[in-house]
Image (spheres, rainbow, N blue to C red):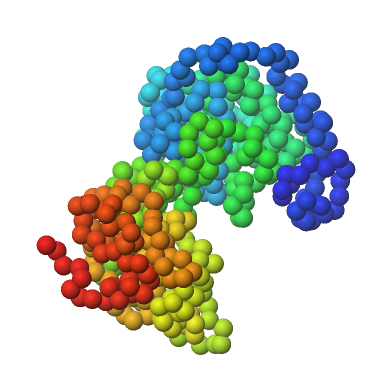
Amino acid sequence: MACGQLLPKWEGRCPACGAWNSVEAVSPVDVLATMQAKGESPSPISLEAASGGPREKVATGFAEADRVLGGGLVPGSLLLLGGDPGVGKSTLALQIGQGVFRATGRPVLYCSGEESPAQLADRAQRVGCDIASLMVLDSADIDAITATLVEKKPPLAIVDSVQTARAPMAVGVPGSPAQIREAIATLLPAAKKSGVPILLIAHVTKDGAIAGPRTLEHMVDVVLYFEGERHGELRLLRGVKNRFGSTGELGVFRMSGSGIEEVEASGKVFFDEGSIRSSGSALTVVREGRRPLVVEVQALTVKSPFGLPRRTTQGFEANRLHLLLAVLERRAGVRLSDLDAYVNVVGGMRLADPGSDLAVALALVSALRDITLAPRLVVLGEVGLGGEVRRVPELRSRLAEAANLGMEFAIIPEIQKGEAGSIMPVIGVTSVTAAVTVMAEPGAFRSG
Ligand code: TYD
Ligand code: MG
């Protein structure tokens, strides 16, 4: 179950991933046979016949979700929407259903194994959904779902959730790997045959993988994750797999008392305008798919009370913090080895873009020396082991977004100075050392 390995007999410990008590004996031949039994016997067709003309994508009503999807919902596709329990998957699905109803004029099918129709109606009212936008199927039975799908041909079917779906053909209780596999093996051809896109909701486990076999992700067309801190209002929709568009796109949403709203293209959600003036804070621009986002990084250093300094990060990879600390110490002569260091990314954002390295490094130095960075400054650059500052892709679009949000200066890699044009005044740096020097110069960032 942990890794999705199929084994012909039960074993106490999975030989593939080493997880105890997670193996379920399923013959791969059986799985193949059931999958084939669901489809019709195959015969080859020409690519020309297969291309069949343009397939209209259906808009979800959220520009942010459409971009992550690569333009909208593709007819006949199977999509997986994963996320922690309580993050807002059902709410998002409901509102997408509303959007699809508005776009097509036809009601969406919501199959609920988690909540009763009355609970769904309550929620629909709370988020201001048109009651007519939804047909509710109060069943988790996969065969009932596919039958309804084929008969009603809704513009979208939502299955909430894959963990409660019941596949009568398979062994095990709902939520078990065999059940989930069978559910998907049934839904996949049903989606293809009926042309109805199916949005499958899935809870994720703590380690971030969708509960049940990892093979799940390989079977579906699109995998989306809905993320966010439970107590924060920000929610991110991340595309991690997409057969119809690019992956790595990020949609930004906000959870309010009346449902989910999208955060328009230029949002000041990842930085706090009040705190920018305190030391230990730096702004950078990351690329998430095609969307540049201005993000605030906060650092704190404090004398380590014990011999072994603590390094704690939130939203930033701990290994990269270790690397930056080592580079600062060895290449820029900034002594940090006996200090605790904390790095936090504002707004629940995870920084995977190496273009944010230099900003993190300067935030650390800013915290250590209690020097405040210029208020409307963004810092861009990847940091190499030699302390050199490397180029970042898409510099211009990052600077343009920063300018949009009122930023006035940028520290960028020296070799990219030519690319910056007249978007905003920039200071080029070749090394971390140069950046550390320039950040403390009071006259460096003055308008005009
Ligand atoms: P839900 O969509 O049920 O999450 P999931 O399906 O991922 O488990 O939403 C969970 C939380 O969202 C719930 O605790 C209350 C909150 N919420 C709001 O803040 N505003 C709203 O309009 C709604 C419907 C829910
Ligand atoms: Mg739910």
Q: How many marks?
A: 0
Q: In the image, 106: left or right of 4?
A: left
Which residue is drawn at the image coordinates 24% and 61% (left, top)? 426
Q: Is residue 28 above or below residue 137?
A: below
Which residue is drawn at the image coordinates 44% and 24% (left, top)? 57
* Residue at the far left in the pictured view: 448
Q: Is residue 254 above or below residue 65?
A: below
Which residue occupies the foreground of this view, 182 or 356?
356
User: Where residue 32 sits in the image (x, y, percent)?
Assistant: 77, 29
Q: In the image, 2: left or right of 151?
A: right
Which corner quadrant holds the C terminus?
Answer: bottom left
Q: In the image, 208: left or right of 12?
A: left
Q: In the image, 75: left or right of 396?
A: right
User: Where residue 328 sits in the image (x, y, percent)?
Assistant: 43, 76
Inspect this view and state whether residue 321 appears.
no
User: Where residue 311 sits in the image (x, y, percent)?
Assistant: 51, 74
Which residue occupies the foreground of this view, 385 or 235?
385
Which residue is drawn at the image coordinates 20% and 71% (left, top)? 444
Which residue is drawn at the image coordinates 44% and 55% (left, top)? 353
User: Where residue 15 sits in the image (x, y, percent)?
Assistant: 81, 52
Inspect this view and state whether residue 340 appears.
yes
